[in-house]
Image (cartoon, grey):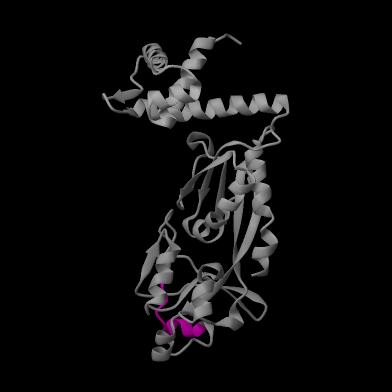
Amino acid sequence: MKRHFDDLQLGSIELFCLSAEAGSFTAAAQLAGVTPAAVSRSILRLEKRLGSRLFARTTRSIRLTDVGKDFFEQCSQALTQLVEAQQAVMGAQATPSGRLRISLPTTYGHHRILPLLPKFRELYPEVTVDIHLGNRNIDFVAEGYDLAIRVRAQPDSTMIARLLEDAKLVVVAPPAYLQKVGAPQTLQDLDQHECIQFELPSSGRRISWLFQEDGREREVFTAGSYSCSDDVLGGVTLARNGAGLFQTYKFIVEQELADGRLVEVLKPFSGRSRPYTLLYPQGRHIPQRVRAFVDFLVQYREKWASL
C-alpha cells in the first residue's frame, strides 16, 4: 500500500478536527498542548494541500465552510476508527469511549430511549451520544451512524437486528367523545366512528388497524376526517382533544389511560403489536461503545414486554 500521509499531515488533520469541535484555534491549542499560532499554521498547510478553505475566519471566530463540514465528518470518523484500532490492539477497549451516533423514531425515542440515556452515560462517561430523531431511513455508511431503531424493519444481510419490543396496540378515545356517540362494541361499529388516520411518510399510504377476533388476526381499514403523517403523537393529541378514535402504541398513552384523559375501547379485540428492532452494521470489528449500548438496551426487553 502506497503511503499517502506523513506525520505532519496526520497531525494537521487531528488539529483541524479539534478546532472544528472546540470552535476556536485557541481552545484546540489548549487541548493539544501547542500554541494557537501553531494550530493556525497547521490548518493553513492543510487548506493549501487540499486547495480549499476549511474555515471561514473573522477576527473573533471561526466556522466551518461547506467543504470543511464534509471534510470534518469524514475525518472525525476516520480518526475515531484509528483510535479504536489502536485501543483494540493495546487491549484498552475495556472502557467504551468515543461518539455514539443513534437514529431513533420520534415516538420511540421520546418514550423509551431518551429517558435511559443519562443512565447509560453514568455507566460509560467516556461515551458521547449524538441523537437523530426522525422517521426516515438513514444510510449508515454515508451518514456515519452506529445504530438505528426502526419499526417493522426489513431484513438486510448487512445488518445485525435485535428485537427490542413487540409494542402493544390499543384503540383509544376521550371520555367526552364516547359520551356523545357511544363506544364501539364490534369491529363493524368502526364504520360509524371518526377514526383518526396515520399515513406512512415514505409512501403516503394510510396504515390499517390491527385486531384479534375469534383467534384470528384481523386487518381493518378505517375512515375519518383527520389524517396525520410522520409523527404518531399528532394522532394522540387529536384523540385527546375529542377528534375521534385512534389506534396507537400502548406505551405512548399509558399516562393518559391512567389519569382518565383517554379510555381504551374494543378491548376484546386487542392483542396485536408491531416490532421495534435495533439495527447496526455487520462487521468483524464492532466498536465497544456500540456493544455496550446494545447490551444496555437489551436488558430492558423483559421489562417492556411485561408492560
Residue that appears at 49% across and 75% down: 256
Task: Give left or right: position of 181 versus 126.
Answer: left
Which residues fall within the magenta stretch? 188-196
Res 194 quadrant in image: bottom left
| Foreground of the two, 208 or 148 | 148
| Foreground of the two, 202 or 265 | 265
Task: Give left or right: position of 94 versus 224.
Answer: right
Question: What is the x, y in percent for residue 150?
Answer: 55, 53
Residue that appears at 29% across and 24% down: 57
| Foreground of the two, 231 or 46 | 46
| 167 to 95, vertically: above or below | below
Question: What is the x, y in percent for residue 83?
Answer: 61, 26
Instruction: Locate the N terminus and report the quarter of the image it occupies.
Output: top right
| 112 to 92, vertically: above or below | below
Q: Is residue 194 magenta?
A: yes
Residue that appears at 65% across and 38% down: 96
| 128 to 151, vertically: above or below | above
Question: What is the x, y in percent for residue 26?
Answer: 39, 24
Q: What is the count of numbered marks?
A: 0
| 35 to 122, vertically: above or below | above
Residue 276 is at least partly visible in this image? yes
Question: What is the x, y in percent for residue 290?
Answer: 63, 41
Task: Farthest residue to the right: give it.
Answer: 91
Residue 5 is at least partly visible in this image? no
